[in-house]
Image (cartoon, helix red, strand yellow):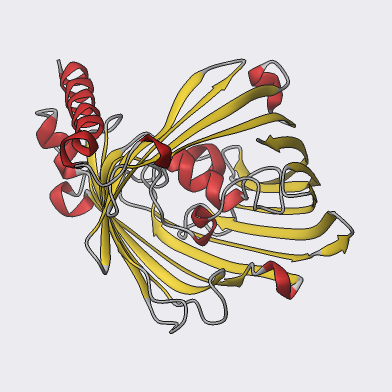
Amino acid sequence: MAGYMKRTVLLLFLTFTLLFPVLLSGKEKDGKDTRLGLLFYFHTDQAAEIKDYYTVGGKVKLKTEASDKLKFQFEVDINNSEIELDELWGQYDFGAPSLRFGLFENTILMEDSFNRRESVFANKNYLQERLHDMGWSTNDSVGLRLSEKSSRSKLGIDSSAELIYIPDSSGLMLTAGFSYPWAQKDSFLGLSVSYYPQTISGLWDNEPSASVDGFAGDQYIMGTVYFGDSTEKRKLIYKLEAAMGSNLSDPVEYTQYPGDGGCSWFLGADGWLGYIISLNKLDWTPGLNCSFQIHDLSAPEANTTTVKIGNRLNWKDDFYIHADAGVEINNYFEGEDRNIETKPDVLCAIRLQYQY
């Protein structure tokens, strides 16, 4: 019954999102303001055996400006293993702030401001992957995003606030972020704070609190800070980012021993450095990425470090090739004596993209 209610709420919300631009559109715009974008891609990495060793597919993106203040975006990903709705939202510009409503990926890291073509690397970094595995980062959500960007002629603070509903967990998440574009529009100095009161999930599903600490133990929080510059005309691009917060699930698969049932905390950091080399119509960007994660601050010996080299080739802003190679080193507890064991794994990935 709870699962049915979740799906019903989601469908109603998306239906409203689809109809809302039509209801408000008026006669200021017409179909000439509709733009269609196509992206074809091929991807494979060290974990690709789960998806038949590779993923090949395409993204279809439709943008419509219903009026001078209202725009609408739809994006679907169709590949050899699934069909997934990535984005379905409308956005209304009130003058200074803008309000986005619908289905979209929440924004908690600096990396969330980039698309996969802009990234120097074929795969997401380890911090992104861990936050997605835990549930802090999700694209299976609907909600509201209120944002205000400073005038680029007079650099100031960009701010945003998101309230999203996550159907899988019946949870509500609130995120507030602030960013200062200290040099150019693609430079970032900022922070974000996310609050995830999992108590709401229990009330929705009519279940008691799962935490041994009761209400207080079900209040999860995470904060991130970041600094970087991806302005391509500068040639040297870089990013440093750190996150600390509550584990939404016990990280037993990384520590190899169960916790005491209470809330545990993680600490993660990620950084990369790249340099753009222009060769006629071809841009080559070699880069180095390092990530570090302590999965439970009460047991810092259990941690993961990744180091990888990436290469991005961009030809005429239409065709992209990404290639990664590196190593992931996991330190974890093993056996009743809880001795630390070290396990290295090879990282490799290739991603080809053509934007039409």
Q: Is residue 92 left or right of residue 259?
A: left
Give the image quarter of residue 72. top left
Give the image quarter of residue 187. bottom right
- In the image, 214 versus 178, the foreground residue is 178
Quarter occupied by the N terminus: top left
Return the x and y of residue 84 as percentages of the image width and height: 46, 24
Return the x and y of residue 323 as percentages of the image width and height: 80, 43
Quarter occupied by the C terminus: top right
- In the image, 223 versus 38, the foreground residue is 38
Residue at figure coordinates x 14%, y 28% from the top left: 205
Return the x and y of residue 113 as percentages of the image width and height: 50, 56
Q: Is residue 250 visible?
A: no
Return the x and y of residue 133 as percentages of the image width and height: 48, 39
Residue at figure coordinates x 63%, y 23% from the top left: 57
Q: Residue furthest bottom?
A: 154
Q: Is residue 240 visible?
A: yes
Residue at figure coordinates x 56%, y 38% from the top left: 336
- In the image, 211 versus 276, the foreground residue is 276
Image label count: 0
Q: Is residue 88 left or right of residue 240?
A: left
